[in-house]
Amino acid sequence: MLSPDSKFQTKKLKSIILGFLVAFGALITLGSWALSSPPGSGPDDEYHLSSIWCSHGYRIQFCEKSTSIYEAKIPLQLHRNGGPRTIFCYAGDSKISASCIRGLDAEAVTRLESSKRFNTSKIGSSFYKANGFFVSPNVNGSILKMRFVQIVIFFALISFAIYSSGERKWAILLALFVGMVPVGLFIIPSTSPSSWAIAGVTSAAICVMNFLISLRKSHRVSAFLGFIVAVLLTLNVRGDINIMMAICLTLGVLSGFVIRETDRSLKLDRANLFKLGFLAAPGLLYIHLKIFSLYPWSVISYILKGSFYSFSNDSPQAFLGFLGGSIQ
């Protein structure tokens, strides 16, 4: 028979091997998606790619001055309306495959055309500048590098959340697996700021929950560091990131206190319920103030007036934001 120490070592080895296989499988999955999705296939990729190319100011071959102060010259390949001479040559035509990108002529690769579709605000500027370091004359190669950088960043953030979860790590991994398929698999390895947004708010929420319920000091330190990194990474990455973060952090705090209290007792007493409500109130109030009120009479009024588009535009964009949509 195996001794207790041997059983512990065997269990630990199995856990390490299984963890490696899960990480390797996730890397293969995200990497395959990054490789199989053609350049320009992400949400609003024309805007995001142009913003990345111009994120470091005017640079020869990448982003040059135009005749208008509201425009900049960017590679013709990045123009969505540039016809068959761009990386969007397949867009809007089901009869054309993305292989048309391989047939771009030399002028399409070197020629620059004016465009208004690039970022001039602080929203998303950190994301664009970080990816701007990978810009090169090889547009396809640059995009591929950027996609794999987003995968690495996602793994780095999630590692804080997984480690701080302790024995609950498999439950967290299962939740991530369910929640990230399929939208997360497409957005995370992309050139959209939503990649950082999804990774950041998810990691922050899990880390907050783990900080409240973990007993080991190393887990709490990991959760704290993960939360700080996630918040700093997502700062101004999207216009609605504050709403998204508020929702996720409120859920993380609620989950943390519910789990912690139910671990102590099979039921929550009234005092704990009041304490839980008091702690959750700031987050819920922030959400209420930042998001358009979804009162039933407001919904009915908008529908009767035929203003459903306006209503949906004013409704919580955070939920649409999780799908990778741009508010630009």
Image (cartoon, helix red, strand yellow):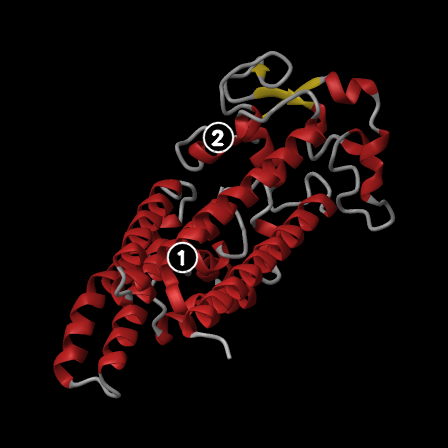
Q: Answer with left or right where residue 93 lies relative to residue 228.
A: right
Check disc 1 and report the residue beneath it.
163
Give me the residue at 25% from left, 71% from top. Answer: 257
Which structural element holds mark 1?
helix
Distance from label 2 to label 1 (Cα)?
A: 26 Å
Considering every residue shown, the one lying at the far left of the view is: 271
Where residue 320 appears, x then y in whole percent? 50, 58
Eye-nearest disc, 2 or 1: 1
Write down the quadrant of residue 149 in the picture.
Answer: top right
The residue nearer to you, when weighing 217 against 109, is: 217
Which structural element holds mark 2?
helix
Rendered image: mark on residue 130: 2
Position above or below: 157 against 271: above
Q: Residues within 10 Å of mark 2 (few under 14, many from 20)?
A: some
Identify the mark nearer the N-term, 2 or 1.
Answer: 2
**Amino acid at pointer 2:** Ala
Position above or below: 59 against 2: above
The residue nearer to you, when weighing 80 against 199, is: 199
Where residue 224 appears, x then y in whole percent? 28, 51
Where residue 323 appears, x then y in whole percent? 54, 56
Q: Answer with left or right where residue 152 lies relative to residue 24.
A: left
